[in-house]
Image (tube, helix red, strand yellow):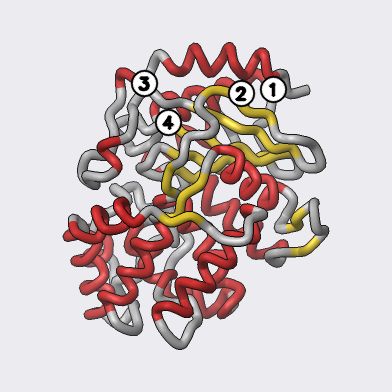
Amino acid sequence: MYSKDQLEQWLEQSKTLCSSGKTADYIPALAKANPHTLGITLFPIGSPPISCGDESAIFTLQSISKVFTLLLALMDHGEEYVFERVGMEPTGDDFNSMLKLELVPPGKPFNPLINAGAITVTSMIKGESLIQKWERIAAFISTFLGEDEVRFNQEVYSSEKNTANRNRSLAYFLKDVGVLEGDVEENLDLYFKHCAIEVDCRQLARMGMILAGNGIDPVTSAQIVPKRYVQIAKTFMLTCGMYNASGEFAIKAGIPAKSGVSGGILAVVPGKLGIGVIGPALNEKGNSIAGVHLLQKIASAWELSMF
């Protein structure tokens, strides 16, 4: 069903949009990425992956990692605990906005995929120390990658940490209103670290393939995450995963997806396949301009929409 020839043709068409976007220059290390990079991997459940373009390019997860810290927090604490502290609704605001934290008491972030929500979720990860919490996140993500360990980009981590004035202000506000527990700087450090985990398109697509299969790794037949929590994560991806363009993407593509400002996009076709995309040139919403176009084309042509 999934033709590599068609995929390559559509990728070349989408690649012409790269010059219309720009890299995430507010994190200096991300600004160095080649804006003309575009790669994709499709990973069907039970079948070999299909890749084309710059699929071997290495990039950091950035906000895509929020999906997996949410899953781990749910496994650590359960739904009631997590959603007492973060909401379940889209915001309509920028992903790093403070606006509704102040306007809507009691300062609870609207959802786990905006920065305030993800920082709060990160604070929930169990561990006796910062190192132990990081090791648990890294080990959890490595099971999705099918690797013994994860790669980590020190330059991106340091760059993000040194320029994170907005995230720091969000975290201290959350601490002030009693939503965020523990040490603020340690929690932020952990947040910046999981955003700086490195992947390529094939690895990202494998992560999506496991979500498509409701948390089962088809290679080992292991249930990595309970089905219920995977359903929650995919719902958030559909409603909140593409920043302020989530509704538009849901209408045009109809599949759960989560983007990151490195240009990565993780997409899931429930019951069928995972998709990993890299395209560092971003549109005004912070999503890969060519990657979004390519995913919408694929979803339309191959009738992948959930609806």
Q: Earlier in the sequence, mark 1 or mark 3?
A: 3
Among numbered discs 4 and 1, the one appearing first in the sequence:
4
Q: Residue at x 50, y 13 (%)?
A: 12
**Are discs 1 and 3 less than 8 Å apart at CB?**
no
Q: Amino acid at mark 4?
A: Gly
Q: Position of residue 22 (x, y in %)?
A: 27, 29
Indicate the secondary structure of the residue bearing disc 4: loop
Label 2 CA crowd tier, 10 Å (few <14, some 14–19, many 20+): some
Disc with the residue nearer the chain's start (4 vs 3): 3
- Residue receiving disc 1: 302
Q: Residue 274 in the image: state x and y as whole percent.
A: 65, 41
Label for residue 18? 3
Mark sitting earlier along the chain (3/2): 3
Please report contact status of discs 2 and 4: CB closer than 8 Å, yes or no: no
* Residue type for callout 1: Trp
Quick one: which residue is furthest to the bottom in this view? 128
Which residue sits at x=52%, y=65%?
A: 138
Mark number, residue 298: 2
- Rendered position, 21 above or below 183: above
Q: Amino acid at mark 2?
A: Ile
What secondary structure is found at the residue carrying circle 1?
A: loop
Q: Is residue 30 left or right of residue 298?
A: left
Task: Tell me, yes or no, whether the two marked residues, 1 and 2, touch with CB atoms within 8 Å.
Answer: yes
Q: Is residue 249 above or below residue 68?
A: above
- Which image quarter: residue 45? top right
Residue situated in front as seen by the camera: 98 or 133: 133
Q: Identify the secondary structure beneath mark 3.
A: helix
Q: Position of residue 37 (x, y in %)?
A: 41, 26
Q: Which residue is mark 4?
A: 279
- How crowded pointer 4 is (Cα within 10 Å; few <14, some 14-19, many 20+) is rated as many
Using the numbered discs, state the Cα–Cα distance from disc 4 to disc 3 in whole angstroms. Answer: 8 Å
Q: Alpha-carbon distance for marks 1 and 3?
A: 23 Å
